[in-house]
Amino acid sequence: MGFAVASIMIAASMLVGCTNNIVLAWDEPGVIHVVGKVLCQDCSQGWNEWVYGGKPIKGVKVSITCLDKRSRVVYYASDATDELGQYDITVNKYVYGKELDTKGCSVRLVSSPDYVCNILTDFGGGKSGVKLSRPTSVYRSLIKHVLSPFYYTTPMCDKPDTDASDSELKDSQGGHY
């Protein structure tokens, strides 16, 4: 009977040891995850399909740039989307021994490998960039920012720039086009 009790105690201590290792694997001290999705909007579709029917784009480069209080770049990283159009940028929480202030970080689209859907849009903030604010989830030392989807569109859907100044619209004789 003493052998059985000793065996159970050894097995229980091994289980506790394994459980602690599993918990430690979930803890990633000093790391922040920024996740989201990149989709293609097709304006040739109906309104519902255009707004809600975006198709994921594989291989899109998404970047994060973090500035300090003096507007100097202190951190830059990027990630490419997978076949579901999802990215997960891992950001170091400590840069040069100081804690990174994520309020100075901006996430934006960089490039699309899709030859049909490669025009940047600001639908979702992908063109101008999205500032990180509060994390979406914090669990132990896991900090995660989940962003709204970013979108690319086709050249056919690109809105022309109508903000040209009058001097750009004059021909060589001084007249307007």
Image: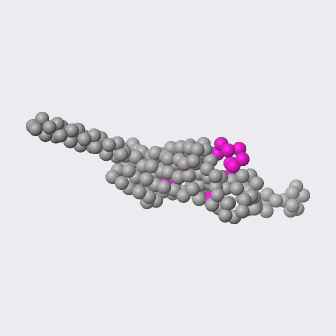
Residue 122 lies within the magenta run: yes
**Extreme residue in the front direction:** 1
Q: Is residue 50 above or below residue 21?
A: below
User: Image quadrant for the N terminus?
Assistant: top left
Q: Nearer the viewer, residue 11 or 112?
A: 11
Residue 22, quarter of the rendered image: top left
Decide if residue 47 is on the left or right side of residue 139: right
Q: Is residue 24 visible?
A: no
Task: Give coordinates of residue 96: x percent, y percent.
Answer: 39, 43
Above or below, 116 relative to 168? above
Quarter placement of the C terminus: bottom right
Give residue 16's quadrant in the image. top left
The front one of 66 and 139 is 139
Q: Residue at x 53, y 52 (%)?
A: 36
Report x, y in % for residue 33: 45, 49
- Outermost residue, right side: 173
Identified at 13% across, 40% down, the residue is 5
Question: Is residue 145 visible to us here?
Answer: yes
The total of numbered circles placed on residues is: 0
Q: Residue 72: x percent and y percent?
A: 49, 49
Residue extent of the magenta highlight: 105-123
Vertical comparison of 64 with 44: above or below: above
